[in-house]
Image (cartoon, rainbow, N blue to C red):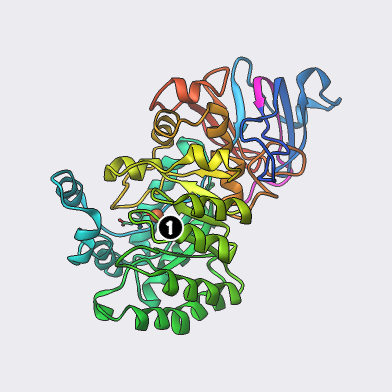
């Protein structure tokens, strides 16, 4: 997606210009500090913010050269970064939702060959065009809720061809629609049927055949692994992520989701960019994240849908861990891309403040995808990725529980949803 050349935009009279400036996860940065400018204004050119400040102090410009938005009475904030999703997949699994409600555990469905493996079957059978069409629709829904950047994972192929197909669909969509896509290779999402009982061999296959193909094409920035009891062990996860890091990829982990295996500790040891889920992370695991500056990506909608206990986001924040919030949108454990639902759960179940929630969805989300220098805050030099709300304050994101209050979305200086 390229912004129209020379596009210039002016937004003025934002009742709150929530900048999140200077806030990208630094030691000692408070997630509560949003750096709000009352009656704020912002200028952008060629997709990049050139000025942000009080409307009264706007530099003298020729407004006829600009797209002018008067945000009078409305809150303006950075675009949301949904830093953990699995949005490219074939088929659906509605029946599993009800099996789980009737008491069958998530991991048991997987061990019977359902769950992720059921989506693998459907994704292997789907042509690229089909995967692309459904994924594009999902991205449009995300955009309407203020998501301007999304991380997307492969992991429903578990073979070289299908993993590459998922990643190349993301690459194409990145060019063709406004939501910026950060691609993650998740070849170690489950053990495919042909490797049943041979997890070590499957890890070798990923390391020796798939990872090199992915890096050769340069179509993934991150490597992720489902580090979980009965899926990939700590040692298998370490081996895979180290191989990926040696090939220049950055590391992420699905860590301590259902069982406290020590995934958070491993994330610290590997200096992963993020550790995600963390429902069962121990005190030692949380300390390892804090010490190594690993972003904790907390996914409360998954805990909600699986009826598991929530991650200890309060303890993490109070221990100095940068916390990001994301949807985990996927066809199994969490079939929702609802940012409003994530916000409601974060406030009510995770006990995060409204300011912490905004930080978690903007600059900490940007850090979780390694883009904190480009996105996540409204300050000079950053991309003009912006949300305008229907209401005067960011507090309404929490207060108007479960509702989408996004009025307009701007990507790289262009209005892309209104
Ligand atoms: O983040 N836990 C592993 N992976 C996904 C679920 C994928 C699926 O169920 O299809 C998750 O929850
Ligand atoms: Fe996930």
Task: Magenta stretch: give its range.
Answer: 1-17
Residue under label 1, please give it: 255
**Res 263 seen here:** yes
**Residue occupying the point 68% across, 32% down:** 19
Magenta segment: does it hold 7? yes
Above or below, 35 against 187 in this view is above
Q: In the image shown, does 262 or 35 lie closer to the viewer? A: 262
**Quarter location, residue 222:** bottom right
Q: Percent from the top left, x then y, of residue 234?
A: 43, 69
Q: Dot 1 surroundings within 10 Å: few (below 14), some, or many (20 or more)?
A: many
In the image, residue 53 above or below residue 299: above
Query: Horizontally, is 3 left or right of 252 in the view?
Result: right
Q: Look at the numbered disc 1 and give the secondary structure of its residue.
A: strand
- Locate residue 386 relative to residue 278 in the image: left or right: right
Residue occupying the far right of the picture: 60
200 drawn magenta: no
Q: Which of 317 and 128 is in front in this view?
A: 317
Left or right of 339, for residue 65: right
Q: In which quarter of the image is residue 190?
A: bottom left
Q: How many marks?
A: 1
Ligand 1: quadrant of the figure: bottom left
Q: Where is residue 85 in the image (x, y as percent from the top left)?
A: 43, 52
- The residue depicted at 57 percent of the width and 20 percent of the height is 393
Which of 177/394 is in front?
394
> Where on the picture, by quarter, is residue 191?
bottom left
Residue 86 appears in the figure? no
């Amino acid at each position: 997606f390229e912004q129209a050349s020379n596009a210039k935009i002016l937004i003025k009279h934002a009742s709150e210009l929530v900048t999140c400036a200077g806030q990208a996860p630094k030691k000692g940065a408070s997630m509560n500090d949003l750096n709000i400018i009352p009656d704020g204004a912002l200028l952008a050119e060629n997709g990049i913010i050139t000025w942000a400040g009080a409307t009264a102090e706007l530099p003298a410009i020729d407004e006829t050269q600009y797209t002018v938005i008067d945000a009078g009475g409305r809150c303006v904030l950075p675009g949301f970064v949904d830093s953990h999703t699995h949005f490219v997949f074939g088929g659906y699994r509605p029946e599993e939702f009800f099996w789980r409600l009737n008491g069958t555990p998530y991991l048991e469905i997987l061990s019977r060959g359902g769950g992720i493996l059921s989506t693998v079957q459907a994704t292997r059978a789907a042509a690229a065009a089909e995967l692309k069409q459904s994924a594009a629709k999902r991205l449009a829904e995300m955009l309407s809720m203020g998501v301007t950047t999304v991380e997307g994972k492969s992991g429903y192929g578990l073979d070289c061809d299908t993993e590459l197909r998922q990643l190349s669909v993301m690459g194409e969509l990145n060019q063709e629609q406004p939501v910026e896509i950060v691609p993650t290779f998740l070849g170690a999402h489950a053990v495919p049927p042909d490797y049943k009982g041979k997890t070590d061999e499957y890890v070798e296959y990923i390391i020796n055949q798939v990872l090199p193909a992915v890096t050769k094409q340069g179509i993934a920035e991150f490597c992720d692994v489902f580090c979980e009891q009965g899926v990939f062990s700590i040692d298998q996860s370490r081996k895979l992520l180290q191989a990926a890091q040696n090939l220049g990829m950055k590391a992420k982990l699905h860590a301590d989701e259902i069982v406290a295996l020590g995934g958070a500790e491993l994330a610290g040891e590997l200096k992963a960019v993020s550790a995600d889920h963390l429902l069962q992370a121990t005190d030692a695991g949380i300390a390892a994240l804090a010490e190594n500056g690993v972003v904790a990506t907390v996914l409360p909608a998954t805990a909600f849908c699986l009826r598991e206990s929530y991650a200890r986001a309060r303890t993490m924040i109070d221990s100095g861990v940068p916390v990001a919030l994301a949807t985990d949108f996927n066809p199994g454990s969490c079939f929702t891309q609802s940012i409003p639902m994530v916000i409601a759960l974060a406030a009510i179940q995770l006990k995060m403040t409204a300011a912490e929630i905004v930080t978690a969805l903007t600059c900490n989300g940007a850090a979780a995808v390694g883009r904190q220098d480009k996105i996540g805050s409204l300050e000079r030099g950053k991309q003009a990725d912006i949300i305008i709300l229907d209401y005067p304050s960011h507090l309404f994101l929490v207060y108007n529980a479960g509702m989408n209050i996004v009025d307009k979305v701007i990507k790289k200086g262009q209005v892309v949803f209104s």
